[in-house]
Image: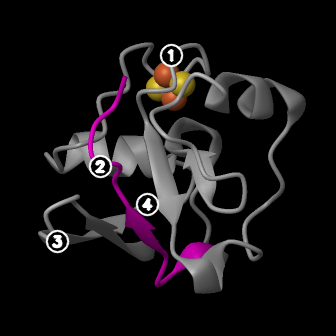
Amino acid sequence: MATITYIEHDGTKHVVEVKNGLTVMEGARDNGVPGIEADCGGACACSTCHVYIAPEWADRLPAKDAMEEDMLDFAWQPDPARSRLTCQIKVTEELNGLVVNMPERQI
Ligand code: FES
């Protein structure tokens, strides 16, 4: 279980508990957090689950694979240092306290 803070573009915060094994996208979806659309359902094929990872967390997550890197090119205003697709991040205890910021819009 990890506590994850999702921050909407307007600053609205959603602090939710997410079970290990789910993805950060599923944590938002299952808790009704707006701003992560996840149109492809987590198949790394849409980029509408894009977030900016809080700077202090950016280097603490498992690295992106090539598929995520490629799909991020289609995200709304990606930031190479902080952008991630939340469907590609599995929740573990190590992610307790993670903070992610939603972009102004998904594509
Ligand atoms: S849900 Fe489609 S890329 Fe993440």
Q: Residues within 10 Å of mark 1 (few under 14, many from 20)?
A: many
The disc at residue 11 is 3
Q: Amino acid at mark 2?
A: Ala
- Which comes before the other along the chain, label 3 or label 4? 3
Quarter the C terminus occupies:
top left
Q: Residues within 10 Å of mark 4 (few under 14, many from 20)?
A: some
**Over which residues does the magenta segment extend?**
95-107
Say left or right for 10 vs 63.
left
Alpha-carbon distance for marks 3 and 4?
Answer: 24 Å
Q: Position of residue 42 (x, y in %)?
A: 51, 24
The disc at residue 19 is 4
| Pointer 2 residue | 28
Alpha-carbon distance for marks 2 and 1?
Answer: 16 Å
- Which comes before the other along the chain, label 2 or label 1? 2
- Which comes before the other along the chain, label 2 or label 4? 4
The disc at residue 46 is 1
Q: Mark 3: which secondary structure?
A: loop
Q: Amino acid at mark 1?
A: Cys
Residue 34 highlighted magenta (yes or no): no
- Which comes before the other along the chain, label 2 or label 3? 3
Q: Residues within 10 Å of mark 2 (few under 14, many from 20)?
A: many
Q: Position of residue 35 (x, y in %)?
A: 23, 43
In terms of secondary structure, what is the magenta stretch mainly?
Answer: loop
Whether residues under marks 2 and 1 lie with C-beta atoms below 8 angstroms apart, the answer is: no
Distance from mark 1 CB to nearest ligand 1 atom below 8 Å: yes
